[in-house]
Each structure stands twice: as structure tokens, then as C-alpha cells.
Amino acid sequence: MQIYSFFVSQKNIFCTFLQKIGGLNCLMTKRSIFVRFLGYMIMNEFTKNIIEWYAENKRELPWRESSDPYLIWISEIILQQTRVAQGYDYYLRFIQRFPNINSLAEADEDEVMKYWQGLGYYSRARNLHAAAKSMQGVFPKTYAGVLALKGVGEYTAAAICSFAYGMPYAVVDGNVYRVLSRYFGIDTPIDSTEGKKLFAALAEEMLDKKRPALYNQGIMDFGAIQCTPQSPDCLSCPLSDSCSALATGQVTQLPVKQHKTKVSNRYFNYIYVRAGAYTYINKRMGNDIWKNLFEFPLIETTSSLTEEELWALPEFRNLIAPGETPLLRTVCRDVKHVLSHRVIYASFYEVTLPAETKSFRNYRKIKINELEEYAVSRLVHAFIEKYISGKEK
Ligand code: SF4
């Protein structure tokens, strides 16, 4: 009787959800969806299991000790495209230097970039800085206000609002897509309009509206630790008895993506100048990777070059002042650097010129031993560490 009353009391949610997914392409038949959701409505099995699992397996992370929206915002932006293990130290260093909105807003962008150096996806740091400036010392208190911040999308806004303010917004990130698509056996592509709507609706339905922070953190950790992309631990999974993908042998096929990421090759030729104690750098501008980071003079080509081919390039010769004859040597060639959408093949050349050279006059002249003060990409930083700093010490 008790179970029956519970189901009747929840039937509107159940019917709404069935309507939402009714016409969609699922591995499960409508009959099995009905059975699954009947089970869900009676037991609230999925949400309950996620929260119980989280109580036992929760990762102790510094940003979870706080309900300060600023600290949560910083952690969420760092974790957008970075694993917890890598982002942990960056978070601690970042909030030590920029402990609140004003300290970040008042900082120089070059310094913010320096604290981000090595994390990748540098637009995150530029957006953090711009958003801090726009807040005028007060973090927004509504979902719409948080969503309006530069660099904050629906996922991050839901995370901040549920963790900091206890608002009932469900997070939908890669972990959530994976867990939901596997558990419910949904093969609608997660990057299709249809899929995005379906998973957003499903995530909302599964959310524990009274404990949104707990549930959101639970499902994210569950995806990161238990239901991982390559080797989910189905044997010890509390959802294994009712997991559709496990029952149908579809675990490794879900979730489905319709577009494969297109990866292109780029060829970077960096010129490291030694002119006495000085070298030359440049700040990357334009709408491209590593915007606002510093680097050595760069010539990008459509293929890998030999030293002779570099010599012959007008772009290279134009850097050298008339009458000067630099000494050129290849330091390393075709170093492969993989980014999400690109593979960069980088060659580094050392050019030796007299201290009073007039070459490279459009670049910033700095002391070689001051290179470490500038924010650079991980690729350039690795070169500095290996071939310059080591020698200078
Ligand atoms: S049984 Fe396996 S696939 Fe299903 S939710 Fe658990 S870990 Fe994920």
C-alpha cells in the first residue's frame, strides 16, 4: 500500500518523463523503459544509490570544504578541462595569490596567465579575469547572474548554484552523460540537439531537489571513479543489477557521439635568439591557441622544414637586419605536442647574433635569465626548462 501510494504521488513526474523520451532512439524498448521507471518511481533507486555511493567514496577536495561561490567558481573553471590530480595544486596556488574577487580583478592579466601556465585552455584564465572585473566585488546570487559570467556555461552555473547556494540545478557534464547513457541504455548521440535535450531532462528528473549539491557531486564522482570511460568497475557497482548497458553488453559502446573531433597538424618553427645575455619574445595575439601567452619568434609553415629550407624562407630572412650574418643551429626538430583539436610539430632553432644586433627589432627584447617570469605554453616552457634554464644554472 505504501509503495502504491508513493507511485501514485509521483505519477506526474513519471508521465512527463516518458513523454520526453517516448519518441527517442533508445536501446531500451518502451516496455523496458516503463519497467525501469516503475522501478525507479518505487525505489528511487538510481538517485538513492548515487548518494549512498558518494557517502562512502567521496573524494576529499579543498573546494568542497567551502560554500564560498568564488572558490567554487575557481575550482569549477580549473576542472572544466583538467583532471583533479593536475588541477589540485593549481587551485591551491591560484587561491593563495587571488583569494577573493577583488584580488583577481585588480591583478595584471599577465600575472593571471602566469598562474595558469601549463594548465592549457588559456581562454579560461582570460575569462576568469574578465568576469572578476565585471563583478564589482560581489559574486552573483542567481542562476541567471552566474550564467551571465564570461566563460560560465550551463554546467558550471548549475555546479556553482547547487554547491554554493543549494539551488536545484542538475549538472550535465561528460561524467553525467556517460553514467546516464549507460545506466538507462540510451544511444541518442550526446552531441546532438536531441541528445542534449534528452539528457538535460533526464538529469533534472534524477536530481535530488532537496540535496542537489550532494547528488551533483555524487554523480560526477561516480562517473570519474566508478563508471569511467575505459574501464568501469561494473563488478563492484551498486547499480549493476539494474544497469541497462551492463545487461545488454553495451557498456563500451555508450555514450554515443555523432561527430568525431577533427584533428589537424600544424608546424611551428621557433627561433630562440641568443644575443649576448638577451633574447626576443612576442605576445601571441589574434584568435588562436595560446592567446596572450609569450613565445619565441615563430614562423608557422605547412610542413616540417629542414634547416636549409628555413634559411631560404623570406619570413626568416626578413627578421635579420641587413649586413648581419647569424649563426643558425637546430636544437630539436618535430617535437610532437598534442592538443585537443591539433597536433603541433615544433622545431626549435637557435640563432646567435652579436649583443648589439638590430635584427628581430619588432620583438620584445628581454634578458635570457628573465624568461621564467613570462607566461608561456607548456611546449615553450618544456624547451626553456630543458635547453635554457638547465644551462644557465
Ligand atoms: S554497472 Fe558498469 S556501466 Fe553500469 S553504471 Fe555501473 S559502472 Fe557504469
Image: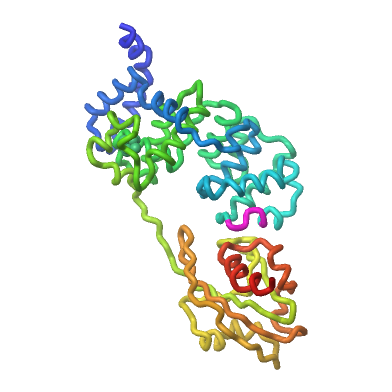
* 335 vs 217: above or below: below
Residue drawn where x is 63% and y is 63% of the image = 376
* Residue 336, x across and y down, in percent: 47, 69
Residue drawn where x is 33% and y is 8% of the image = 2
Out of 296 and 172, give the one closest to the viewer: 296
Quarter holding residue 386: bottom right
Q: Is residue 196 magenta?
A: no
The colour scheme used here is rainbow
* 61 vs 3: above or below: below
* Residue 347, x across and y down, in percent: 53, 76
Quarter holding residue 146: top right
The residue segment tinted magenta is: 114-118
Name the quadrant of the N terminus: top left
| Dominant SS in magenta | helix
Out of 59 and 20, give the one closest to the viewer: 59
Residue drawn where x is 50% and y is 23% of the image = 211
